[in-house]
């Protein structure tokens, strides 16, 4: 039976989803186009590979290969520096006639696969840095292209649910990958094999894109003026305000994958080992964290659709801050750390559930149709900056607990207060824009 042909909205440049016949097994799923589901399936493969190493990479490089936490922090930060360059190029490539969304996604997966094979044999600091730089470059090409494809294929009404689906499959893949890796390490302990498996999943993802995803970029009738487009983006005060707050969100997220696993392994006085928690227990914490996001992502995203985006982001910051306070608390208090650790991971889950789809949807609403690649590239730059500052800051803090590093989690809470103030300013800017748009519409309706 033929698929209904999607219609393109001439005002927004988005494609309206074809009607989908609902049944009792699918009514709870978001009503999205087939390409979105195919991309999500490929992304599931990608994040299973990501889950193989996400929790264990810093532990492996420090405890198994003998690198210091500062060296590992610097190597992870080099990934962010390479990502800064890659994201600027990606912003141009995603909107270009030659590369577009599809080829940029395939290039991203290929480079990231090569990075994983480098890290599988990273027994020197130079190879560790090279692998992380390639990893940062590959990831930097991915998200602007992915976000642009998702925005191209959705309407404003279902866009947040599409991004929520993206986060759901990310988390499902991370949970499966982390769980499988945790059990594998417990039995065999061969970390390098995990990096090779991760590289293979990225190659599989590139194959899915090549076979199943067509180019979604709409042809532009206007002549493309690259520097003028970038200048227009940098003059958008609403965009710059959003990016300022988003950098703090990404510094928060960077701690989950770089500082937190090592902190739980080596700096908790009452875990299940002499220094903290074992790798197996840490894997259980992260699986719990991810499973909560899998179960609650779509229901919570639907339940808050009518709430102002800025208010949702402020609530997310509050939940993050309470979680960080609990991590600080278990590091200085001689009591059982287990219940507080579980509670902290639960709060992290709720914070990410609120932040992930809402933040990117808000940017998609702000971005002009012909500048989506550039706007998503700049949003992705926040992740480069956050993953440059975050791991280096966390690595230094763990190396220098006597010089104030033990209070890292409290410093992060202070950063959340700053982000909340920035979001209040953003809310005022968005209200002002809405009032101006309404005024211009009224003038046009009156023929003025």
Image (cartoon, helix red, strand yellow):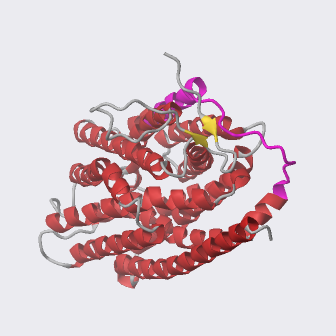
Q: Taking 229 as reference, is 247 left or right?
A: left
Locate residue 365, reporting x and y percent: 59, 59
- Tell whether 224 sits left or right of 401: right
**Which residue appears at 19% of the width and 70% of the height?**
269
Residue 133 percent coordinates (x, y): 60, 51
Q: Residue at x 42, y 37 (%)?
A: 44
Give the answer, above or below, for where 85 lies relative to 193. below
Q: Is residue 223 magenta?
A: yes
Q: Is residue 142 magenta?
A: no
Q: Nearer the viewer, residue 440 or 101?
A: 440
Q: How many marks?
A: 0
Q: Residue furthest top?
A: 1
Q: Which residues are magenta?
A: 198-227
The answer to which image quadrant residue 69 occupies is bottom left
For the C terminus, which image quadrant? bottom right
x 54%, y 52%: residue = 156
Residue, x 50% and y 43% (percent of image)? 119
* Residue 275 seen by the camera: no
Task: Please tell me in which quadrant of the rendered image residue 52 appears.
Answer: top left
Residue 421 image position (x, y, % from top left): 49, 82
Q: Position of residue 405 (x, y in %)?
A: 39, 78
Q: Residue furthest left?
A: 336
Q: Is residue 271 left or right of residue 145?
A: left
Q: Is residue 226 shown left or right of residue 288?
A: right
Give whichever of 283, 414 is nearer the camera. 414
Question: From the viewer's perspective, is residue 45 above or below residue 376?
Answer: above
Camera-side residue: 146 or 329?
Answer: 146
Q: Which is more toward the observer, 409 or 32? A: 32
Inspect this view and state whether residue 445 appears: yes
């Amino acid at each position: 039976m033929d698929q209904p042909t999607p219609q393109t909205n001439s005002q927004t440049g988005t494609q309206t989803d074809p009607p989908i016949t609902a049944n009792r097994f699918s009514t709870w799923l978001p009503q999205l186009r087939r390409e979105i589901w195919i991309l999500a399936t490929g992304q599931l493969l990608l994040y299973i590979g990501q889950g193989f190493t996400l929790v264990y990479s810093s532990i492996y490089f420090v405890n198994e290969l003998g690198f210091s936490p500062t060296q590992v922090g610097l190597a992870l930060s080099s990934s962010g520096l390479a990502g800064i360059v890659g994201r600027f190029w990606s912003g141009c490539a995603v909107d270009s006639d030659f590369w577009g969304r599809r080829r940029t996604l395939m290039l991203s997966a290929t480079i990231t696969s090569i990075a994983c094979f480098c890290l599988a044999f990273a027994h020197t600091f130079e190879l560790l840095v090279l692998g992380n730089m390639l990893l940062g470059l590959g990831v930097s090409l991915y998200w602007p292209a992915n976000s642009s494809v998702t925005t191209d294929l959705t309407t404003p009404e279902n866009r947040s649910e599409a991004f929520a689906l993206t986060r759901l499959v990310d988390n499902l893949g991370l949970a499966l990958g982390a769980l499988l890796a945790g059990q594998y390490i417990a039995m065999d302990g061969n970390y390098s094999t995990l990096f090779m498996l991760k590289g293979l999943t990225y190659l599989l993802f590139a194959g899915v894109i090549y076979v199943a995803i067509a180019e979604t970029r709409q042809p532009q009738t206007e002549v493309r003026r690259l520097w003028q487009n970038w200048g227009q983006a940098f003059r958008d005060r609403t965009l710059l305000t959003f990016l300022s707050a988003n950098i703090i969100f990404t510094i928060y997220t960077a701690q989950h994958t770089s500082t937190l696993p090592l902190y739980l392994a080596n700096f908790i006085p009452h875990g299940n080992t002499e220094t903290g928690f074992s790798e197996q227990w840490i894997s259980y914490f992260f699986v719990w964290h991810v499973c909560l996001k899998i179960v609650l992502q779509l229901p919570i995203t639907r339940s808050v659709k009518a709430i102002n985006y800025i208010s949702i982001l402020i609530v997310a910051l509050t939940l993050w801050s309470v979680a960080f306070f609990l991590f600080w608390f278990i590091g200085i208090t001689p009591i059982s750390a287990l219940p507080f650790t579980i509670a902290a991971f639960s709060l992290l889950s709720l914070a990410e559930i609120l932040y992930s789809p809402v933040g990117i949807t808000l940017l998609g609403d702000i971005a002009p149709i012909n500048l989506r690649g550039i706007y998503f590239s700049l949003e992705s730059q926040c992740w480069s900056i956050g993953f440059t500052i975050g791991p280096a800051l966390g690595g230094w803090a763990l190396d220098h607990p006597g010089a104030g590093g033990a209070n890292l989690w409290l410093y992060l809470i202070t950063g959340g207060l700053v982000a909340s103030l920035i979001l209040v300013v953003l809310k005022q800017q968005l209200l002002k824009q809405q009032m101006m748009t309404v005024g211009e519409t009224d003038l046009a309706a009156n023929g003025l």
